[in-house]
Amino acid sequence: MALTKSFRELVQRRVEADPEFATALLREGIDTMLAGDVDTGNAILRDLLQGNGRPEN
């Protein structure tokens, strides 16, 4: 479990520091869901939201 926690922390730090990365995660999550892989899309969006990612325009 430590590896998963470290990965999530890494994503959270990157989302907080890099708005472009947050935007890319948002797009990837939506595109993945639209392609039919809803579970993976949800996982990507969950990682984004847990990182407090709020993509800015």
Image (cartoon, helix red, strand yellow):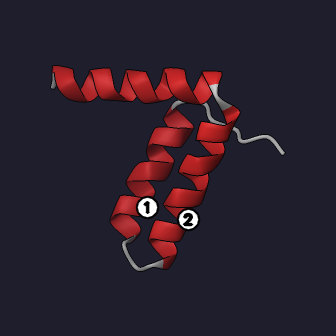
The image quadrant of residue 54 is top right
Distance, label 1 to label 2, CA atoms, is 6 Å
Q: Which mark is residue 30?
A: 2
Q: Quadrant of the C terminus?
A: top right
Return the residue nearer the eye: 22 or 51: 22
**Crowd class of label 1 (few under 14; some 14 to 19; many from 20; radius 10 Å):** many
Q: As displayed, is residue 28 above or below residue 5?
A: below
- The reply to whether callout 1 and callout 2 are in contact (CB within 8 Å) is yes
- Furthest residue to the left? 1
The image quadrant of residue 8 is top left
Residue pictured at 43% horizontal, 61% vertical: 41
Horizontal relation, residue 31 to residue 40: left or right: right
Q: Position of residue 56 (x, y in %)?
A: 79, 40
The residue to which callout 1 is attached is 41
Instruction: Identify the mark nearer the N-term, 1 or 2.
Output: 2
Horizontal relation, residue 49 to residue 39: left or right: right
Q: Where is residue 22 in the image (x, y as percent from the top left)?
A: 61, 40
Q: As displayed, is residue 27 above or below residue 13?
A: below
Q: Position of residue 14 (x, y in %)?
A: 53, 25
Horizontal relation, residue 52 to residue 1: left or right: right
**Crowd class of label 2 (few under 14; some 14 to 19; many from 20; radius 10 Å):** some
Return the residue nearer the eye: 15 or 52: 15
Q: What element carries label 2?
A: helix
Q: In which quarter of the image is the N terminus?
A: top left
Q: How many marks?
A: 2
Q: As displayed, is residue 42 above or below residue 9?
A: below
Return the residue nearer the eye: 39 or 57: 57
